[in-house]
Image (spheres, coloured by chain):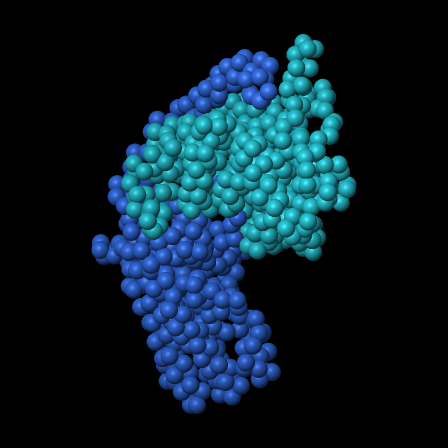
Amino acid sequence: MKLKISHFPGYKTLWLLSLGALVFYASSCDPDDDDVDDNPQTDSFDVTQLLAAYESTIIQPNIDALVAAAEELDNSVSLLQSNPSENALADAQSNWRALALAYSGCQSFNFGPGESTFGSFAENIATFPVSVEKITGYIDAEDFTLNNFDRDTRGVYGLDYLLFQQNALSDLSNANYAAYTSTVASDVLEQAQELEEGWSSYGQEFATDAGTEVSSGITELYNAWIKGFEVVKNFKVGIPAGLRVGQTEPDPTQVAGLYSGTSRELVRNHLEHIEVMYFGDLLDADANAIGFDDYLLTTVGGAEVLDQTKEQWQVIWSAYNDLPNQPLDDLVVNETDKVETLYTALSQHTRFFKSELSSRLGLTITFDSGDGD
Amino acid sequence: MQTKIENILDWLNKPIHAAPLTMFRVLFGLLMAFNTVRFWYFGWIQNHFVDPSFHFTYFGFDWIKPLSEAWMYGLHVLAFLAAIGIMLGFFYRLSALLFFLLFTYFELIDLTYYLNHYYFISLVSGLIIFMPLHRYFSLDVRLGRVEETDQLPRWPLLLVQFQIATVYIFAGLAKMNYDWLFQGLPLRIWLPADSGLPIIGWMFKYPETAYLFSWIGMLFDTFIVFFLLNRFTRPAAYVVVVVFHTITGILFQIGVFPLVMSLLVLVFFSESWHQKVLQRLQNVVYSILPAKQSESGSKTIDLPRLKKAGLFLVATYMLFQLTFPWRFIAYPGSMYWTEEAYRFGWRVMLVEKAGTAQFFVRDGEDGREGEVYNREFLNPHQEKQMSFQPDMILQFAHFLEDHYKAQGMKDPIVRCEAWVTLNGRPGQLLFDPQLDLTEVRDSWAPKAWINPQQR
């Protein structure tokens, strides 16, 4: 005899009981949601348009500007090396400021060609604070190879020390000091050129990748951008202000641009970059500039998040503009409350980046994620 | 009563051909071997078990810790060999036991990586330890370790089918909620992100597609098992299974789940179908390794019967599986918001949820407060999962309390500002950001400290 479920003793009673239970289960779920979505999705959005716009109007031009600034600086450092003088130093310092500004526009490009086995572009070119002790050690040892992982001895902020420290001009008369400075300037140029070269081939791939998986263009960009925001919030403002748990007081030596006195300006430049990467332009100054904001508007609940995000940007800029025009290393000591207000504003902004935006765009925020279900 | 139980036992012990369960054993072992290699290949042994300095633990299982790097890699080699052992039926019981223990150990190390299909794998690998799936077409038979039989009792097949049915039906029932059916959420968020996919991507930009997929998903999960059980609808149902899982596999990052389910549901196919497929497989194998005399024909022996004690255990297990997902009824509020009773309930790809959890630690002595940089202790995946799950937030807060105490801070006060967004709703504070989490203890009791969901 062929066995059937109906041969199971008492199967009818069991069947009815199961059916009743399942109906009860289903009706128990989430009975009182009635206003989930006041902001229904209104339009579709072509992600590749966003990526192509970012690639052609932000990423490529900013990297080109960085390379141009690095070339200028490298040239001026070479001149400084051959003929140290106040004018030559002033020229190099001016070019460093241009370089630092140009780098601010590339803070979020630590993916694709900006990521290598030996670290991200930012790690290789812009680690701060620098270690004066290590720099001095390499100079004294006449080791100009940079064949080490001491990234706090080089890059943009290494040059900040080498060109702006109190005795820079006299030290530059020292052949070893000048040679080390020249090596660091050339290395910055080389790193920038490598990034430029990498993007010349990766750009097309990036701009046409419409996926949203972890390795897709938009997810890579998004994750690098979030990290960029956390760098300015935590490392450029939070730690110098002594607001990390365990710190007992402000630590002005932790600012970026300590020696050039540009720390406050660098925070502004970095924030402007984050803002540009959100709106495609500064707070959407150019209504035609395509950005994450346009994408957000096409998603469920996106308009409300966008309004809140814009409001919070205003709070951030208001807090920033309230800071006296002094380097941040002075402000964290003398204007503690105002710096803390800026930090709090940045902190409150985090959720708009990390969860509200990614959740609505369907982006994966992790880098090493496993599966989901 | 006595007769009724005897009748049930007779019915469960009725012999069936060994082919369906043998095929199940081979496929399950193969899939698990593949899964273990894949896990290693993606670097997840390192990322999940070796690198993190902190692990979120399951309630009551905080004694489970990862071993050293060499051990973790070594145990995965062992898990791979155990999976191969299951597939080949080689030291089968030992292999199944080993795989169950190792896989479950891996999963219990860190709550971050909880997945419904990992839970399913743990359950199945635990069940098959007690099933005589190595009595046919196995190395144990070939090596004379066990006697061959082409007839197995019916209860193992029913139990495996029950387990698979549980996954689908509960997943379907979980989709019967307002967001899923009447708001098209979260698919209305997820699908447009895939509108760049070739061929099918164009349709995902329309909200109507999300509604359609939501209803199809609910109907599929709830009813597919019944269509697989019916021999007339079975072939078409299986095509639907493959199409459904292929599409979800393309759209979402759900790893081996589609492959596992697509292959394991073959256990619903008839004995004769399995006999034919197995015969072909045997022909291939025996062309390489000629069959022994004992393997070439059919042979039936009497295997130990399921007795009352066994029936009691099986019934208890089934009752647990049928009731445990219901425990959410005991908790107030929406489980999608509070996460209470959410796990182990087959709520598969059900909500879009994200959060930002910022922790602040205040020195109880000098009152100075600082923010914790979560990445100092957590990897991005851990941080992401923690940020919207209250029990994980609580665990991390207690870890921070211990950490900063060890650093010399007296009576640290840990608070957290956790903003969570659920299915596109505006972000909302998960609980009072002034709450000192060091004073809160986790338990099975409802977490009264969680704010009610506002919208």
In-front residue for pair B283/A36: B283
Q: Position of residue A124 (x, y in %)?
A: 49, 69
Q: Position of residue A59 (x, y in %)?
A: 34, 64
Please tell me which residue is depicted at 32% across the width and 53% down the height of the picture. A47
In-front residue for pair A313/B121: B121
What number of labels is visible?
Answer: 0
In-front residue for pair A77/B148: B148
Please tell me which residue is depicted at 76% across the width and 38% down the height of the picture. B146
Given the current orientation, which residue lies at the most extreme top position?
A: B1
Q: Is residue B321 visible?
A: yes
The quarter in which the N terminus of chain A is drawn is: top right
* Location of residue A117 with respect to B286 vertically, above or below: below
Q: Is residue A343 visible?
A: no
Left or right? Give the position of B370 relative to B239.
right
- Chain whose colour in the figure is cyan: B
Please tell me which residue is depicted at 53% across the width and 14% down the height of the picture. A12
* Location of residue A214 with respect to B352 vertically, above or below: below
Given the current orientation, which residue lies at the most extreme bottom position?
A: A82
Q: Position of residue A362 (x, y in %)?
A: 39, 45
Q: Colour of chain A?
A: blue
Left or right? Give the position of B336 relative to A306.
right
Please tell me which residue is depicted at 49% across the width and 88% down the height of the picture. A173
In-front residue for pair B176/A241: B176
Left or right? Give the position of A281 relative to B281.
left
